[in-house]
Image (spheres, rainbow, N blue to C red):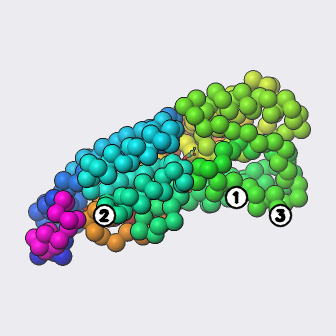
Amino acid sequence: MSSLRSRVAAGVLGAGVLAVSLLGPAPAGQARPARTSLTIALVRQLCTGDFFAQWLTGAQAEASALHISLNTSCASGNDAQMVSNGRTAITQGVQGIIFDHGLAQPMAPVVAQALRSNIPVVTFDLETTDTRVTTIDQNDLQLGLQITDAMIADVNGKANVGLAHVGGFLPLDKRKSQWDTVQRFFPGMHQVATWGTVSAATVAAVQNQTVAALTAHPEMSAILAPYDAFALGATNAVAQAHRSVRIYGADISTADIQVMTRPGSPWVATSATDPATVGATAVRAIALKALHRTVPTYVEVNPALVTQSFLRSHHIRNMEDLRRVLPAFAAGDTLPRP
Ligand code: SR1
């Protein structure tokens, strides 16, 4: 009997609320996932835009493959609503919770309440100081390094830079920290303005803000916009203002690829993971934790730098093309299935 089987037989998994049965032996050479009857809550802060749609598709596909019921809520940026959704999941007695984004301060008591209730927790892009939680990210320090490195090389170390940023969002703060370091050590790289909005209408809001910043700063020659909704808004603004400014973004989707490869597009580089892989990783991590397997405290899905010239020269038109041409991009799975 496998150790998991013996623990199930002995009834020691998860305070009696966790029902687990394993499928029969896997065919030779094939890993077969455990069949579970886990109910997992996915508590989301944000859900508008391509990144979040692709992430959810990946999470749902993995949940389906693992026979997990995934109860998904979205707070649409309302932190009090996200807290309430988290508390509802705890009351319902789910076997695990994934918190997706959110601000550290309002979410900390809910995370603590879940852990007190013996409900394992995985966070994606939400800061927590409790090491019982597994935190997943897209290696945002590396992501920030990739786009700032690309910018420095393209402009030969000299640019007046506009920064699109909103503080408090963990991935954005990590990415910005690389830009802060660049300004310290590269005297030709200057920040001349900063702006940003995260809302259900981020692209339009950032477009308006970018037009105002471009008007106020005719010397601006590059924009660091490390979230695709920021980069899309900035791209529209640069066209509207008829300016020649290079944009360095984050994230990727089929729609983003089309914008980046359009003739004359100012969006010249992005650093991105496959969001579907990240969503799948979060589901796998919570399933492993619910089954009392060991999961690292930090799980990072590494991003790849994707430039406009790479997309154009390889005739990449969509995410399927990108996955085929850049295998490292799709190879982000670092956790086994249960
Ligand atoms: C408002 S935070 C937006 C970011 O969250 C995810 O990490 C995506 O990469 C996106 O850029």
- For label 2, the SS is loop
Q: Amino acid at mark 3?
A: Phe
C-alpha gap between disc 2 and disc 3: 46 Å
Q: Nearer the viewer, residue 219 or 44?
A: 44
Residue 272, compared with residue 218, is above or below; it is below
- The boundaries of the magenta stretch are 5-18
User: In the image, what residue type sits under mark 2?
Assistant: Asn
Q: Is residue 242 magenta?
A: no
Callout in the foreground (1, 3)? 1
Task: Judge: label 3 CB < 8 Å from ligand 1.
Answer: no
Q: Position of residue 288 (x, y in %)?
A: 31, 64
Whether residue 259 sits left or right of residue 2 in the image: it is: right
Disc 3 marks which residue?
185
Residue 259 visible in image: no
Answer above or below: position of 206 versus 68: above
The residue that label 1 is drawn on is 177
Is the C-beta separation of discs 2 and 1 under 8 Å? no
Specify the quadrant of the image occupied by residue 291: bottom left
